[in-house]
Image (spheres, rainbow, N blue to C red):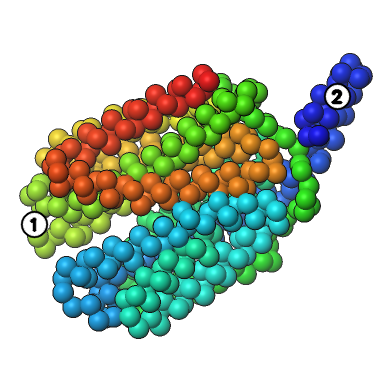
Amino acid sequence: MSGLTDMEGTVEESGTAADVTAAARATALRSYAGRNERYWRRNLAVCVFGSFTTLVSLSMLLPFLPLYVRQLGVSSQAAVIQWSGVAFGATFLGTAITSPLWGRLADRYGRKPMLVRAAIGMAVVMSLIGVAHTVHQLVALRLAAGLVGGYASASTVMVGTQAPRERAGWALGVLSTGALAGNLIGPLVGGLLPGWIGIRGTFFAGGAMIAVAALLTLFVVKEDFHRGDAGARAGSRSAAAGHDGARLPQRAHYAVIAALLVTAMMVLLANMSIEPIITVYIGGLGVAADRLARVAGVVMACSALGSMLTAARLGALADRIGSWNVIIGCLVATALVMIPQAFVTEWWQLAGLRVLMGMTLAGLLPAIAKLARHAVDERSTGQMLGYLQSAQFSGQVAGPLMGGQIGVLFGLHAVFFVTGSLLMLCAGLAHWARRA
């Protein structure tokens, strides 16, 4: 019998306010979040640093990936582009496949072992990439980085389950800021380090950064985990109709989970749908060929910059006004910002709109993760957040594929219209799920 049911039984037997308070306190102490309340701020700081360093290491290869592919024996320009895309996407595919498994193991063996496993695995794989001899080895190692890694995903599971319910949105927003900063700084680092220590040396440096995160995780992160502990049903079968606390019937419960997974996928799908065509699109705005790559890099970074500015604030807003309100508002706002991008005449206009889009997208993932935490039993939160991470990375894989196909078939401007329409449909789905 769950902790919540135990508490309800105590209320029925005693009928006194004192017994209710005592039962609630006992339930909190039995829960995972209650036992780790004294650790969550320290663990959040380490997880932010670890997510930042691992994502810097994974994204820093963007500027020199085609050069490395060419070093590995690929000669034709078309093959270089093709293998670069495959190698880059392999990591996200691997993470999407294994995130639910790691989340389930986190529920069974604890969150900290998953963080240590991810950090050590990524440190080793990142260093091995620096000694690859063929492009096939590069792709296999990038895939392995996704399969065995996923430090940011494991951090979401730990922070999402340890932070107090009333601070979960803010904590997940801070964690998201660290990950976004890593994605923003990584390409800048990748543009500088190869000139100093060479391409292969850059991978060794990335592995060393992740190794530091692994040591901090091993010796600083604390966790009070009881194997086999069913935990309290904190918000069991709840998903915040207005303020994240209403009990849901079984059918509505599954509808809410499905809506959360679809929305999580749409966040990164919307952000990544323009990536395959953004350089071509900017070229059509009159940017000179010798400035095209640099300007495209700036525009690509703008959405991450915007998200860094608002992720923690919107996460805290979800704690105050309810996660569903933030999700629906951010989806509608992102859709409205997406459409004008089809009508820009200067690259800086597109950059400004991408900053605004990043600011509106930033509120989605912390609010979704907070709802996902309370949509299932506490003993299943790791697995649920793992599915959530899988949905996000699926969007990161599907977004460029969808954007590229739409751009080829219907023109570049159509990508913005289709993506905006999908976001509005997703807002309607979230509104329906909230009223379920």
First in sequence: mark 2 vs mark 1:
2
**From what the image shows, is residue 228 above or below residue 211?**
above
> In this rendering, would 175 be left or right of 111?
left
**From what the image shows, is residue 206 above or below residue 6?**
below
Residue 142: numbered disc: none
Local crowd size for mark 2, using a 10 Å CA cut-off: few (<14), some (14–19), many (≥20)? some
Q: Amino acid at mark 1?
A: Ala
> In this rendering, would 202 be left or right of 210?
left
Closest to the observer, 15 or 164: 15
Question: What is the x, y in percent for residue 197?
Answer: 36, 81
Query: Pointer 1: what residue?
Result: 288
Question: What is the x, y in percent for residue 86?
Answer: 31, 64
Q: Residue furthest top?
A: 15
Closest to the observer, 130 or 303: 130
Q: In this rendering, which labeled residue sits more in front, label 2 or label 1?
A: 2
For mark 1, give the secondary structure. loop
Which quarter of the image is occupied by the N terminus?
top right
> In this rendering, would 227 be left or right of 207?
right
Query: What residue sits 53% from the left and 20% below the top?
Result: 436
Inter-mark Cα distance, 2 to 1? 72 Å
